[in-house]
Image (cartoon, rainbow, N blue to C red):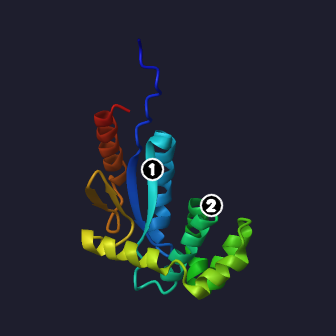
Amino acid sequence: MSDSSPVPPTAPVVLDVWCELQCPDCRRSLEDLHALRARYGDRLELRLRHFPLEKHKHAFAAAQAAEEAVAQGQGWPYVEAVLARVQELERTGEPFLVDVARELGLDAEEFDTALIDGRHILIVDADQAEGKAIGVTGTPTYVIGGERLDGGQSQEGLRARVEEITDRLLAASGS
């Protein structure tokens, strides 16, 4: 008698992306993230982690807004839309965050309320604390397979390194 039970799918490799939405380097990293998504599809899970830097006065609010976008089912599209216009965020702050939500068809009033009531502060604080604990000092920083890769100083060769680690982890899992 053969076992016809379905084989459970292999869990994807997780790439934690420590980012802040007022960071020009994080904006530049989007090209790499798009290439990684195209290459690996659902075998690689990109997980947004917040690391707002003190030098960017709207970064903490932007992280909270990104979490509201996640709650409304549009986390990455929102993150990419904000990063594409970093200078506008720098100039106009929180009203810009609400405008981006509106442009994406999200509930802008809920964004405004979330920025006032602070419902996502604990998520942002927890990410930032974890980042500090593992040695994140700038953005973007990636963590994959237990390895921390710092893109805050230079992103040169970073995508190739992420691909090397991903390929190794996928081979080890049989994917």
Q: Measuring 45% from the left and 78% from the top, which residue is drawn there?
A: 122
Looking at the image, can residue 147 be seen? yes
Question: Residue 64 location, x and y as percent?
Answer: 53, 77
In this picture, residue 153 sits left or right of residue 24: left
Q: Measuring 74% from the left and 65% from the top, which residue is drawn there?
A: 105
Looking at the image, can residue 93 be seen? no
Q: Quadrant of residue 7 in the image? A: top left
Question: Residue 27 location, x and y as percent?
Answer: 50, 65
Q: Nearer the viewer, residue 161 or 64?
A: 64
Up the image or down, 169 lies above or below 107; here it is: above
Element under label 1?
strand
Up the image or down, 168 lies above or below 67; here it is: above
The residue where tag 2 is placed is 73
In this picture, residue 101 sits left or right of residue 16: right
Give the amino acid type for the residue marked by disc 1 in the picture.
Glu
Packing grade of label 2 (10 A; few <14, some 14-19, many >=20) is few
Up the image or down, 132 lies above or below 10; here it is: below
Q: Quadrant of the N terminus?
A: top left
Give the amino acid type for the residue marked by disc 2 in the picture.
Gly
Question: Residue 99 location, x and y as percent?
Answer: 70, 76
Q: Quadrant of the C terminus?
A: top left
Q: CA distance from mark 1 to mark 2?
A: 16 Å
Earlier-in-chain disc, 1 versus 2: 1
Packing grade of label 1 (10 A; few <14, some 14-19, many >=20) is some
| Residue 45: assigned label | 1
Q: Nearer the viewer, residue 63 or 72?
A: 72
